[in-house]
Amino acid sequence: MALLPNASQIPAQRVSMNETPSAPVYAAREWYRFFDTLHTYMPAPAAFTPALTAITNVTALTAGACFYNQMGTVVALTGTFTLDPTAAGNTVFRMTPPVLDGLTLSTAAGTFVTTASGASDIGSVAAVSGTLEFRLNAVNTAAAVYAFNVNYQIA
């Protein structure tokens, strides 16, 4: 894949904006640089340590490495946690999301899955009372590491 030029590598000049035979309309290369910079903006992920609260059927719960990206009003989270359920069955806990900036969590969707060999625990994530609620039907009481991916919108 060829690398595209950086906006600072494009020389300042005027370029034609249309291909009609009439008098051409020109835009300054500085505007091209401005719009190119907007188009190629990629936010860098930031690490965070989530606050986790046990709700139902949780013996121990520990956060692992977690990261987030924000693009406008949408925040994407990814990370890991270790969950030790008290018994097999419905298991629920909540996470306080990062980057609310005084705004409220309006909608969220996500999933998480165990990384343990031979296990197939899969859970879902939804927005509940301004937090992210993780729900799982645990198949046994063994502690396991889970990886999650959640997107939510702030309003």
Image (spheres, rainbow, N blue to C red):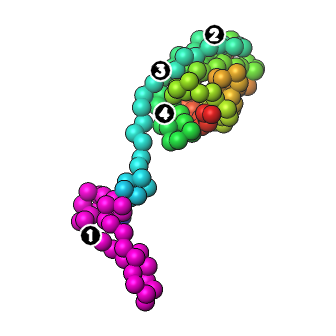
Task: Specify which label sits upstream in the sequence, 1 or 4.
Answer: 1
| The one of 144 and 69 positioned closer to us in this rendering | 69
Q: Amino acid at mark 4?
A: Tyr
| The one of 20 and 77 positioned closer to us in this rendering | 20
Q: Which residue is mark 1?
A: 13
Q: Which circle marks residue 49 in the picture? A: 3
Mark whose residue sits in front, 1 or 4: 1
Task: Specify which label sits upstream in the sequence, 1 or 3.
Answer: 1
Q: Is residue 142 visible?
A: no
Q: Spatial distance from mark 2 to mark 4, Cα to Cα?
A: 27 Å
Q: Amino acid at mark 3?
A: Thr
Circle 3 packing at 10 Å, graded few (<14), some (14-19), many (20+), is some
Task: Specify which label sits upstream in the sequence, 3 or 4.
Answer: 3
Circle 1 packing at 10 Å, graded few (<14), some (14-19), many (20+), is few
Circle 4 packing at 10 Å, graded few (<14), some (14-19), many (20+), is many
The structure residue drawn at horizontal position 76% and vertical position 20%, both measured from the top left corner, is 89
- Callout 4 secondary element: strand
Q: Amino acid at mark 1?
A: Gln
Q: Quadrant of the C terminus?
A: top right
| The one of 59 and 132 positioned closer to us in this rendering | 132
Q: Which residue is mark 2?
A: 59
The structure residue drawn at horizontal position 66% and vertical position 18%, both measured from the top left corner, is 93
What span is colored magenta in the figure?
4-33
Mark whose residue sits in front, 3 or 2: 3
Q: Spatial distance from mark 1 to mark 3, Cα to Cα?
A: 47 Å
Mark whose residue sits in front, 1 or 2: 1
Q: Spatial distance from mark 3 to mark 2, Cα to Cα?
A: 20 Å
